[in-house]
């Protein structure tokens, strides 16, 4: 990402776009709460617009012999890949499966596949020893703040925070039960701009594999 904007600067923008004075209707903290909700929506829209690779993180997970489940990172939102670590330089990607095929890989042994169950992954077959799994994933956005040693602020490309700020201004006007058509129009404008720019930065489509397991030959169908 190329630009970071502070929560305080976004609050200032929202007050300007919604024509609010310092003590009018909503406190800065309340505006920040609405910004958080809109920022999370914006973040997920970026993911759906094939910008997931901007946010990828990795974490090493350790299995327990005889236990099929491994707890996911606390900020886990969406999986990218799970790889079995064979050595410090060699990994083998595990296949994505599901609950219906939980017995398709045997009872115990070296993990071959996985599926998500709550805040954990279930490895198939159940690990017969201790293994290291490299988890590549998309994290949650987190709570925006300007405080602390490492404040969490919004990553913005091409000024995409404008979409969030105009959307919040529109929300606030709606909460005031006033005419917010102008703010709503600007929200739509910024929204369309976000999606257009997102596609332009990633010209190739994200491939989503759909696999079958069991007695049916495995195959992958990619959606463009």
Image (spheres, rainbow, N blue to C red):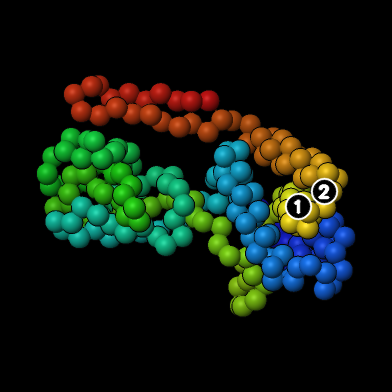
Q: Nearer the viewer, residue 150 or 120?
A: 120
The crowding category of the residue bearing disc 2, from other C-alpha atoms within 10 Å (few below 14, some 14 to 19, many at least 20), is some
Residue drawn at (33%, 42%), measured in percent from left and top?
93
Q: Position of residue 63 (x, y in %)?
A: 24, 58
In primary-sequence order, the first of circles 1 and 2 is 1
Disc sitting over residue 207 in the figure: none
Marks 1/2: CA–CA distance: 6 Å
Q: Position of residue 149 (x, y in %)?
A: 61, 77
Q: Position of residue 85 (x, y in %)?
A: 30, 51
Q: Nearer the viewer, residue 72 or 185?
A: 185
| In the image: residue 146, left or right of residue 48 | right
Q: How many marks?
A: 2
Looking at the image, is 169 positioned above or below residue 147? above
Instruction: Find out whether the residues at labels 1 and 2 contact each other: C-beta distance under 8 Å.
Output: yes
Q: Does dot 2 land on a helix, a strand or a loop?
A: loop
Q: Nearer the viewer, residue 99 or 220?
A: 99
| In the image: residue 161, left or right of residue 42 | right
Q: Which residue is mark 2?
A: 180
Q: Position of residue 175 (x, y in %)?
A: 74, 56
For residue 115, which quarter of the picture?
top left
Q: Which residue is mark 1?
A: 174
- Residue furthest to the bottom in view is 148
Q: Could you tell me if residue 108 is visible in this image?
A: yes
For residue 31, which quarter of the picture?
bottom right
| In the image: residue 124, left or right of residue 59 | left
Residue drawn at (33%, 47%), measured in percent from left and top?
116
Q: Does dot 1 land on a helix, a strand or a loop?
A: helix
Residue drawn at (69%, 71%), measured in percent from left and top?
29
């Amino acid at each position: 990402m190329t630009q970071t904007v502070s929560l305080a600067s976004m609050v200032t923008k929202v007050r300007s776009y919604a024509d609010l004075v310092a003590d009018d209707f909503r406190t800065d903290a309340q505006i920040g709460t609405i910004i958080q909700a809109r920022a999370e929506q914006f973040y997920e829209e970026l993911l759906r617009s094939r910008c997931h690779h901007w946010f990828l993180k990795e974490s090493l997970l350790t299995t327990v012999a005889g236990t099929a489940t491994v707890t996911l990172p606390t900020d886990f939102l969406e999986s990218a890949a799970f790889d079995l670590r064979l050595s410090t330089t060699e990994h083998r990607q595990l296949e994505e499966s599901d609950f219906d095929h939980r017995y398709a890989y045997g009872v115990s042994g070296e993990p071959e596949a996985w599926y998500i169950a709550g805040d954990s992954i279930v490895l198939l077959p159940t690990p017969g020893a201790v293994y290291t799994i490299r988890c590549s994933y998309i994290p949650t956005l987190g709570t925006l703040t300007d405080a602390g040693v490492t404040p969490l602020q919004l990553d913005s490309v091409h000024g995409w925070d404008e979409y969030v700020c105009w959307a919040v201004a529109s929300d606030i006007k709606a909460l005031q039960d006033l005419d917010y058509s102008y703010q709503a129009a600007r929200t739509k404008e910024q929204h369309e701009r976000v999606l257009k720019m997102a596609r332009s930065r990633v010209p190739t489509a994200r491939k989503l594999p759909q696999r079958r397991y069991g007695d049916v030959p495995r195959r992958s169908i990619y959606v463009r």
